[in-house]
């Protein structure tokens, strides 16, 4: 007899789409992945073709179930996690996008955001959404599409178009166009969602010129979102969990207690600190966001967002040709005793938290004639740790509670967390233990956990927390004077980039 005790997670990321089947113990038993093209139509512009994402999603769903040697009858539910802020506008009736998706990294609306800040709109947006006005978020991206696709604004006003992040687009397609919804975590990244009232805000919608008629319904992160069309996997399967990728990773890391913090290392780097049922207003340019929402009750987080982490390693491979595979950076980093004074500030699309400088651009400083590829590769890895230190210092200033678990350990995940050298350097630079989980696919695990809770596969959050296992713990071992000297050099390199605007 089939055991419908498995959960299928869609992990739709910035450079690839994956599907992972998890069993009742939260262990992956089937994985499928496909990369898709990136489009760079102008300087600072990044786009995806939603049709590429849709085709890959269907393919990896089928491939993951097949690799697990299961059938549709074995799948109790589907969870979705997605690259956040990436914006799609599509036809409500046909499901066809009216423009390529504008990716979270895209900076085309930076001037619009600067104008809004100069007009004094920042405090209003911050008070309601917990966000800074920045091109990173979805609102100005959606407005740009409506302004540049002829007739689309009028169609949106008539309710003929849908706005959504990637989760909403996939949900609409998976359900055959029956459902236009999102969850509270993705909604909280749009700049038009009031995180206190937990609803779209008419004043902000008017400010950003987005018709309410095109907005999705906002549900809990663990909820009945609808069910797939039968022809996708052979039978209709409930979709019962949705969360933005970083919130899903927070849930997958079982960071359920206030003060617990995780950092995910993928294309970018994102650290989230659980602050419980009270949103904490940052004084250090961190974001206040929804970590997850269950039974109508939101749990909040402070977040620091770094735009480029793994993307810098990809640039070493594709742009400079220093490496042919990302795993080679570990070998290169250990081949030299240090970075020889070389710093790489990976501001390829500007700087995120805590600087929020969209006009900064990447730079390598400290080069000498005896610096080589190994030093540059090591500097790229070190930059990930330096940026994480930036975030943690800012979070500690916002969350000074003496009983905070931020003094305990940093839980890490994402593809780069598999690099032992990086994890050790993180521990050294933060002067904090770093814990890598046994299941490193925590983003997909979080989506599966949210879906499995609603479907009854997993009992409760306590059971999920008890199931979390540490694969390896990295203890800090660098002397304080060296830590301070390296970090001071990083801060100087960042200021040089910013002074170069």
Image (tube, rainbow, N blue to C red):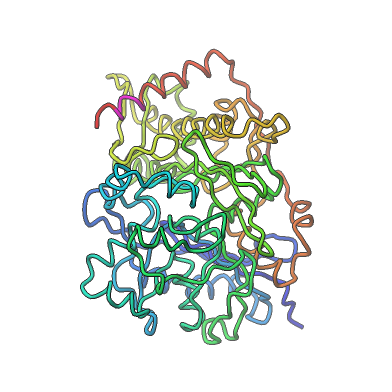
Residue 379 placement (x, y as % from top left): 41, 29
What is the magenta segment's predominant secondary structure? Answer: helix
In-front residue for pair 143/359: 143
Q: Is residue 487 left or right of residue 441?
A: left
Residue 323 placement (x, y as % from top left): 37, 41
Q: In the figure, residue 446 lies in which quadrant?
A: bottom right
Please tell me whether residue 417 belongs to the stretch shown in magenta.
no
The span picked out in magenta is: 494-498
Please identify the quadrant where the C terminus is shown: top left
Residue 316 to residue 483: above or below? below
- Residue at 29% x, 19% y is 368
Q: In the figure, residue 427 lies in which quadrant?
A: top right
- Residue at 66% x, 28% y is 475
Q: Is residue 397 left or right of residue 49?
A: right
Residue lying furthest top in this view? 481
Residue 287 to residue 336: above or below? below
């Amino acid at each position: 007899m089939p055991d419908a005790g498995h959960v299928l997670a869609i992990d739709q990321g910035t450079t690839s789409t994956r599907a992972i089947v998890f069993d009742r113990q939260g262990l992956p038993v089937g994985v499928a992945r496909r990369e898709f093209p990136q489009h760079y139509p102008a300087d600072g512009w990044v786009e995806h073709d939603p049709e590429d994402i849709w085709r890959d999603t269907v393919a990896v769903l089928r491939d993951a179930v097949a690799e697990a040697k299961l059938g549709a009858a074995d799948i109790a539910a589907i969870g979705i996690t997605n690259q956040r802020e990436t914006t799609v506008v599509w036809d409500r009736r046909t499901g066809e996008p009216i423009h390529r998706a504008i990716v979270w990294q895209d900076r085309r609306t930076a001037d619009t955001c600067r104008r809004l800040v100069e007009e004094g709109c920042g405090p209003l947006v911050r008070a309601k959404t917990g966000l800074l006005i920045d091109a990173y978020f979805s609102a100005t991206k959606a407005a740009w599409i409506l302004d540049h696709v002829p007739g689309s604004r009028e169609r949106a006003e008539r309710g003929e178009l849908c706005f959504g992040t990637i989760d909403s687009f996939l949900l609409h397609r998976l359900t055959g166009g029956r459902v236009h919804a999102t969850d509270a975590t993705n909604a909280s990244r749009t700049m038009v969602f009031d995180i206190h009232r937990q609803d779209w805000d008419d004043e902000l919608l008017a400010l950003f010129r987005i018709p309410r008629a095109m907005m999705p319904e906002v549900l809990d992160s663990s909820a009945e979102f609808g069910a797939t069309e039968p022809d996708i996997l052979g039978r209709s399967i409930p979709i019962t969990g949705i969360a933005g990728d970083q919130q899903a990773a927070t849930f997958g890391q079982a960071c359920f207690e206030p003060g617990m913090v995780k950092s995910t290392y993928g294309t970018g780097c994102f650290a989230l600190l659980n602050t419980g049922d009270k949103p904490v207003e940052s004084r250090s340019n961190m974001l206040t966001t929804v970590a997850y929402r269950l039974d109508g009750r939101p749990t909040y987080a402070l977040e620091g967002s770094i735009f480029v982490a793994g993307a810098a390693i990809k640039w070493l491979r594709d742009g400079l040709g220093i490496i042919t595979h990302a795993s080679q950076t570990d070998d290169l980093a250990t081949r030299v005793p240090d970075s020889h004074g070389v710093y790489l500030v990976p501001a390829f699309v500007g700087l995120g938290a805590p600087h929020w400088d969209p006009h900064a651009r990447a730079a390598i400083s400290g080069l000498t004639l005896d610096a080589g590829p190994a030093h540059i590769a090591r500097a790229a890895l070190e930059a990930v740790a330096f940026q994480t230190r930036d975030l943690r210092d800012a979070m500690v200033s916002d969350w000074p509670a003496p009983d905070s678990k931020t003094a305990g350990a940093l839980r890490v995940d994402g593809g780069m967390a598999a690099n032992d050298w990086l994890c050790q350097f993180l521990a050294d630079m933060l002067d904090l233990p770093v814990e890598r989980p046994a299941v490193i696919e925590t983003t997909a695990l979080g989506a599966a956990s949210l879906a499995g809770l609603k479907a009854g596969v997993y009992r409760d959050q306590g059971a999920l927390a008890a199931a979390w296992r540490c694969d390896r713990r990295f203890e800090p071992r660098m002397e304080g004077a060296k830590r301070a000297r390296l970090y001071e050099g990083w801060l100087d390199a960042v200021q040089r980039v910013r002074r170069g605007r």
